Image (cartoon, rainbow, N blue to C red):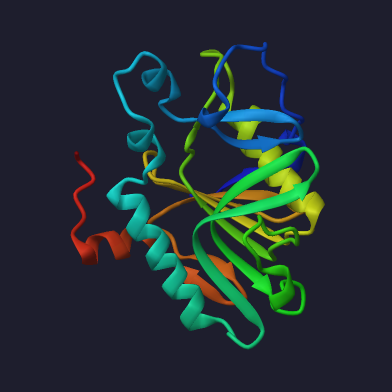
């Protein structure tokens, strides 16, 4: 059954107590607040390497490719630029984000705005796969302190829709500014952007991915 999430659940992220964590472990910064790679504590205690925590899982990698292919094949490529990977976005002076799958209007992301630097114009549509940051505070609320603020920052920048996939709970969050946010089971057909839809459960079943390990 589809559940609803109200926009009023969105809030500003709480400021964390300052800790001596190296800058190389920062994955994103949103409105001046750093967010660290999931597993950064294992890097600090030397039970994992930086490379281990920076990489996607096999499931995350192939979900991104699947979603990229759906959008690439379903949208007008003369109108939109579709990308997948880890796009760097710089929406304001205090924010640097990483985005998984993006759709840009070609009239906004013109060739002269694509360089060796982070992109500085808003995507129309964004898909995020899982949460690859970890809060320093064990009692922190990842939705209130990271997910909602990131979505809100994208909306403030001009993004028209965000879809966030959670592979562990097998849920899909669909968010549009000033509308009720919706939470779907991933067995449902979920519209992504301009008539392009996905069904993650069917894709995973066809591919035969093992989600038990």
Total numbered badges shown on the rendered structure: 0
Residue 131 drawn above or below residue 1: above
Residue 20, image x, y percentages: 58, 12
Which of the image's four quarters has the C terminus?
A: top left
Residue 107, image x, y percentages: 76, 79
Point 67% across, 11% down: residue: 17
Residue 173 drawn above or below residue 67: above
Residue 69 drawn above or below residue 91: below
Q: Is residue 53 left or right of residue 17?
A: left
State the image quarter where residue 35 is shown.
Answer: top right
| Front one among 156 and 205 | 156
Q: Is residue 31 visible?
A: yes
| Front one among 150 and 19 | 19
Residue 126, image x, y percentages: 60, 59
Residue 172, image x, y percentages: 49, 50
Point 40% across, 26% down: residue: 39
Point 33% across, 17% down: residue: 46
Point 38% across, 45% down: residue: 167
Residue lying at the far front in this picture: please name it.
Answer: 116
Q: Is residue 178 visible?
A: no
Q: Is residue 114 left or right of residue 44?
A: right
Q: Is residue 151 left or right of residue 86?
A: right
State the image quarter where residue 102 is shown.
Answer: bottom right
Q: Is residue 213 left or right of residue 56?
A: left
Residue 43 drawn above or below residue 115: above
């Amino acid at each position: 059954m589809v559940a609803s999430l109200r926009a009023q659940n969105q809030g500003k992220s709480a400021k964390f107590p300052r800790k001596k964590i190296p800058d190389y472990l920062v994955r994103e910064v949103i409105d001046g607040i750093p967010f660290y790679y999931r597993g950064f504590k294992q890097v600090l205690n030397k039970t994992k390497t930086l490379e281990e925590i920076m990489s996607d899982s096999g499931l995350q990698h192939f979900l991104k490719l699947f979603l990229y292919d759906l959008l690439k094949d379903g949208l007008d490529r003369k109108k939109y630029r579709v990308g997948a990977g880890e796009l760097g976005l710089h929406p304001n002076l205090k924010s640097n984000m990483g985005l998984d799958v993006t759709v840009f209007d070609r009239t906004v992301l013109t060739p002269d705005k694509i360089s060796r630097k982070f992109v500085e114009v808003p995507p129309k549509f964004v898909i995020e796969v899982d949460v690859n940051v970890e809060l320093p505070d064990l009692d922190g609320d990842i939705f209130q302190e990271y997910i909602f603020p990131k979505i809100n920052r994208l909306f403030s920048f001009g993004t028209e829709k965000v879809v966030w996939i959670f592979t562990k709970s097998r849920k899909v969050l669909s968010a549009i500014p000033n509308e009720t946010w919706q939470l779907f089971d991933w067995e449902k057909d979920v519209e992504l952007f301009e008539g392009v839809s996905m069904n993650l459960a069917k894709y995973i079943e066809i591919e035969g991915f093992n989600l038990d390990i």
